[in-house]
Image (cartoon, helix red, strand yellow):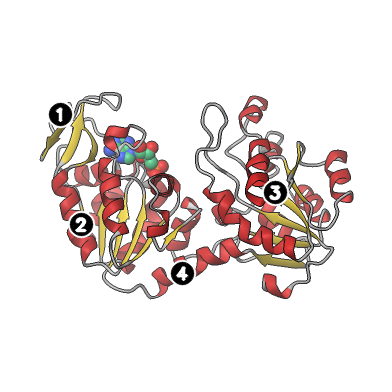
Amino acid sequence: MKKLEDINLEHKKVIIRVDYNVPLNENLEITDDNRIVESLKTLNYCLEHKAKVILLSHLGKVKTEEDKKKKSLRVVALRLSELLGKEVKFIPATRGKEVDDAVNNMQDSDVILLENTRFEDIDGKKESGNDPELAKYWASLGDVFINDAFGTCHRSHASNVGIASNMQEVCLGFLVRKELDNLLPIIDKPERPFTVILGGAKISDKIATVQNLIKKADYILIGGAMAYTFLKGKGIETGKSLIDEESLDFAKDVLKTTNKIILPIDHIVSTSTENSNYQIKNTLESDDIGLDIGPKTRELFKSYLLKSKTIFWNGPMGYYEKEVYQEGTKELCEFISNLDATSIVGGGDTASAIINMGFKDKFTHVSTGGGASLELLEGKGLPGINI
Ligand code: AMP
């Protein structure tokens, strides 16, 4: 595959698959624009080289007509326009005359953003199912295709793999290259000790990653609800804490085969996720729900982090939606930000938390793709990269 710098972009229609799947609040305001900010390098490069830029992105999942109202990219076009300092024309369609006319009328250095690619999922999952006709149509809009949406590189969709397979001039954008430059070395040759922090709720999505990381990492610190599935697997009382039942056997097997896994030794517990009153306990009782790692666990985890040269983190240490249960995550974040180690955050909730706390620049790399970075850490190639 050619490099972006080796492709002549002048006067060309350049389709860029970006990842503008940004979190929105109830008022449909963007609460974290990091993915838009991170896309600017490729965009500015194309504009400086007098390309006509056609942007495609998804935003959330779209299953019904009703979902469309909350998943329009119009708000993203406005934010992008502010960040670029130039007009970004929003086209409220994913195909048809409106799109064709807009593309045909473009001048050099114009930017247009089409509507959410997943609007095409309502009628037969055309985007997510990589429908050949849709892929061919989108490819027909441009001369060059740049995949710069790392967050969807683990998926074979019409707007990434589909378009690429219908075009001659195809390359990766600067954002995707930066992700690979930061993530691949920690699999291939991490500076040791290499410590992985895993949190969040579900293990089932992360089983293959955990299996590969057991081989690669020196220590795996597990917090969040994920820890309770492992503690239960050890026969320890977990009360009413959230358990990923379908992964219980996996957790038991893992604990039998490795001693690299470090689990919490105390907990912040309450009677419900809505209750802000909590207690700190070393062991849970039958009615307790563990909602954050306790102070002794934070110190235990820090002792491993302190001696680490490479740190990879995916998933919050507690029930992050409620401020009172964010402390464990915040404390580790602050601690890592002062360490002299390669520190990488694997997207998702943890990345948003770190960015919102203002620590982004203190980490070596904050990935824009949660699922994609985890699949990369499984040690397998991603379809959106091998285009
Ligand atoms: P995941 O999608 O698997 O990365 O999980 C992220 C979710 O896990 C977030 O919504 C967190 O609030 C939630 N979470 C983390 N720790 C806990 C916990 N101890 N109890 C309940 N939910 C948790």
Q: Position of residue 204 (x, y in %)?
A: 39, 46
Q: Give 312 or 237, whichever is nearer the viewer.
A: 312
How far, Cα to Cα, is label 2 from label 1?
29 Å
Q: Residues within 10 Å of mark 3 (few under 14, many from 20)?
A: many
Q: In terms of sequence position, does the residue under pointer 4 or pointer 3 come before the other?
A: 3
The residue pinned by badge 4 equals: 184
Q: Which residue is mark 2?
A: 302
At label 4, which amino acid type do we have? Answer: Leu
Amino acid at the residue labelled 1: Ser
Report which residue position mark 3 lands on. Answer: 56
Q: Residue at x 24, y 42 (%)?
A: 228
Q: Nearer the viewer, mark 2 or mark 4?
A: 2
* Upstream in sequence: badge 2 or badge 4: 4
Q: Residue at x 17, y 49 (%)?
A: 297
> What's the residue at 56%, 67% (across, down)?
177
Q: Amino acid at mark 2?
A: Lys
